[in-house]
Image (tube, helix red, strand yellow):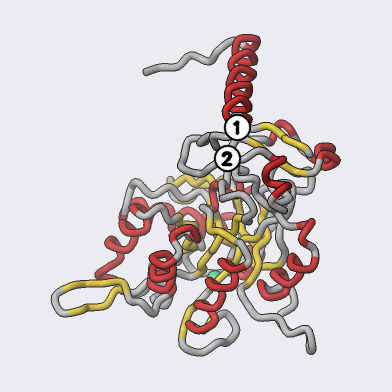
Amino acid sequence: MIHRPLKKPLRMICVLLCIAAVCAFAGAGCGSTAGDETQVESVDKLLEKGIRPNEMGMVMILEYHQVLEKESDYTRSIENFKKDLETLYDKGYRLVRFHDLVTGKASVPAGTTPVVFSFDDSTESQFRYIKEGEKTILDTECALGIMEAFYKKHSDFGYKALFNYLPQLFDQPKYKKKKVDYLEENGFELGNHTINHPSLGRLSDEEVQEEIALPVKNMKEISPEVKVDVLCLPHGSVPKNQELMYEGSYDGIKYKNNWSLLVGSNPMYPVYHYKNPGKLLPRIQAMDYDPEDGSGASGSGYWLRFFDRNPELRYISDGNAETVCAPSYMKTRLLPDQLPSGMQFVGY
Ligand SMILES: [Zn+2]
């Protein structure tokens, strides 16, 4: 069916009618549903319960590399990775898809905070298949296996992540396609992490485009359905010609990225906040923070502690996917043209 866009005044009337309908429904206390099974409650109800929504607050994209037995630089120990899941869950963080977060469409229950997991370098420690008799199963001690087990216990935490891939694609060549298919079927996302993992800032324009174009071609050969529109910068190094991160071509292969990912090291404001980072997004490395000696500052341990101490800066959902809800004075910080279509600001 083809929908023709409605003319402006007509569209406005429809929007108003929809709002009226939603308000009437919520007012009647039936707990309307906004397209999914999540209950939507009025802001007054949430405030009564002690939930102060702030969808103008900051969010985090966490960054992992290896997940192995021993903790070290660029390796999270299995034990600490399991702890991360527990800690995030207990503190009210919920996994969302990268694309939903960066387009302002992340939807999590009232009182919780969206968070994105990103894994770099596509190592086997992140996604490993093992044999159990005749069967091939997901290893319960790789990152994905640990996440799946946690999700079985706490389905409301979510089972999502962005995997920034290198050509080895999780190191088990015979399962390459099977793994990509699994990720695709289960709603995971894939990001381009180049071919040789160089610092792009040191390369010529042509070399930069080669590094970014070839992974796109490689992924098309494995699975033409996978859409890759995010570039994860090796070592966080930005090329001299920044436009080449987003658009370019090499040997007839064209690419287009909507976002680039840095290596560190802070949270960010949503896309509709005037302080949003644009297309070049910061991330936060998963690591512990020791306030005594300051080690791990700017990592996830530091920032989780920061949000515990500064709760008013943290994004808190109102559980309604149709609104951006926050204290009224924050409306001046809103970029209305960056709001996803159909979304409204609701102040209190
Ligand atoms: Zn890397």
71 to 324, vertically: above or below: below
Q: What numbered label is drawn on residue 40?
A: 2
- Quarter of the image with the N terminus is top left
SS class, disc 1 = helix
- Quarter of the image with the C terminus is top right
Asked if residue 277 shows in the view, the reply is no
Q: Residues within 10 Å of mark 2 (few under 14, many from 20)?
A: many
**In the orientation shown, which residue stands out farthest toward the left?**
134
State the image coordinates of residue 275 (x, y, percent, origin top left).
Answer: 78, 48
> In this view of the protein, which residue sits in the foreground, 41 or 107?
41
SS class, disc 2 = loop
101 to 123, vertically: above or below: above
Q: Amino acid at mark 1?
A: Ala
Residue drawn at x 54%, y 81% is 80
Residue drawn at x 15%, y 79% is 133
Q: What numbered label is drawn on residue 26?
A: 1
Q: Gap between marks 2 and 1, in whole Å?
A: 7 Å
State the image coordinates of residue 214 (x, y, percent, origin top left).
Answer: 44, 57
Task: State if disc 1 and disc 2 touch (CB < 8 Å).
Answer: yes
Q: What numbered label is drawn on residue 237?
A: none
Asked if residue 219 shows in the view, the reply is yes
Residue 70 horizontal side relative to residue 217, left or right? right
Q: Tell me if the residue at label 1 has its CB under 8 Å from ligand 1.
A: no
Residue 166 falls in which quadrant of the image?
bottom left
> In this view of the protein, which residue sits in the foreground, 115 or 207?
115
Which quadrant of the picture is home to ligand 1?
bottom right
Q: Tell me if the residue at label 2 has its CB under 8 Å from ligand 1.
A: no
Residue drawn at x 68%, y 43% is 45
Residue drawn at x 58%, y 22% is 21
> In this view of the protein, which residue sits in the foreground, 235 or 147?
147
